[in-house]
Image: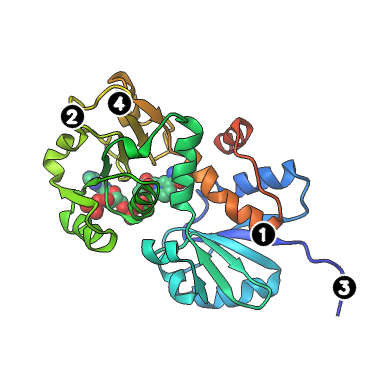
Amino acid sequence: MTDHPRIPLAGVIGSPIAHSRSPALHGFWLKRYGIKGHYVPLDIAQADLAEALRMLPKMGFVGANVTIPHKETVLRLADVVTDRAALIGAANTLIFRKDGKIHADNTDGAGFIANLRQHAPNWNPQAGPAAVFGAGGAARAVVAALIEVGVPEIRLANRTRTRAEVFRSDFGAKVTVHDWIHAGDMLEGAATVVNTTALGMTGKPDFRIPLDALAPGTLATDIVYTPLKTQFLIEAEEAGATVVDGLGMLLHQAAPGFERWFGQRPEVDEATRKAVLGA
Ligand code: NAP
């Protein structure tokens, strides 16, 4: 037995994982706060996930982030699942507890809201309906968070309508489902507009909707952050909306994990953004 203190390790589990900005982000915070710890990318195949989760704590890992394609599977492998992770149906943050149990949480929704609060401090989620485009995994976290902060109605449209209809049964009557081809109509009277589809990402077609019904001052946000300013945000800004890009969601969702693993609440500020953008 050794009584040398162990250097805490954390990482991001996914496959592929080389593109992930999380190591740059956590690495920046570790350096900023002078913490002796490491955060690494962990490329783990689906078939090896259960064994990896059993072994990582034994190797000095205190927790991990989880990304595609493991966010749903880890819920079945965790011992303790928070209510919000269960509702969303996915986890992005694991804590390997000292008692050997794996605690799974989802901080994407909280990160989404914290980003809007930081960059649009006058945003009032209760002022009117939210128009949400997309019904994938990230949309579940966004919709759960919008309901939690008191948005009165979530108008949801997805290319595959049946996926949006599942939201209505999972999240309740605040969710109304709209046709993808008439989705621009959802903007009428909306206080918040969110693109959660993968459209607009570098290499994909732009996310384009008619913005005639967009009232000036409406909050428009895109959770896609490559590029930082998507075509949707450019057009929404031209139409008079207050726009917030998606990078802050990534930064804020990471903060609770960092705090639990390394014992320091990290600040999400301009230097943090720059560190991740420069990576
Ligand atoms: P996902 O579960 O695969 O869902 C993808 C969504 O995009 C679905 O609604 C899908 O519609 C829609 N979509 C894809 N291609 C489309 C097309 N050609 N036309 C219309 N709709 C299309 O992915 P996800 O995990 O939700 O992620 C979605 C995006 O959010 C990604 O770009 C991801 O990088 C980003 N994201 C950002 C953050 C952040 O921290 N900022 C966090 C999580 C995710 P169908 O159901 O019809 O296929």
Q: CA distance from mark 4 to mark 1?
A: 38 Å
- Identify which amino acid the numbered label 1 is placed on: Trp
Residue 3, label in figure: 3
Nearest to the eye among marks 1 and 3: give it: 1
Query: x and y percent of residue 234 in the render?
Result: 34, 24
Query: x and y percent of residue 194 in the render?
Result: 32, 39
| Secondary structure category for the residue under label 4 | helix
The residue drawn where x is 29% and y is 24% is 235
- Answer whether residue 202 is visible to the viewer in this image: no
Query: x and y percent of residue 117 in the render?
Result: 47, 36
Q: CA distance from mark 2 to mark 1?
A: 44 Å
Relative placement, left or right, of 66 versus 219 is right
Q: Is residue 116 positioned above or below 162 on the image?
A: above
The residue drawn where x is 60% and y is 66% is 95
Q: Is residue 97 positioned above or below 179 on the image?
A: below
Query: x and y percent of residue 120 in the render?
Result: 45, 30
Residue of label 4: 236
- Identify which amino acid the numbered label 4 is placed on: Ala
Q: Residues within 10 Å of mark 1 (few under 14, many from 20)?
A: many
Q: CA distance from mark 2 to mark 4?
A: 10 Å
Q: Are marks 2 and 4 in contact (CB under 8 Å)?
A: no
Residue of label 2: 210
- Identify which amino acid the numbered label 2 is placed on: Pro
Q: Earlier in the sequence, mark 4 or mark 1?
A: 4
Q: CA distance from mark 4 to mark 3?
A: 58 Å
Residue 261, label in figure: 1
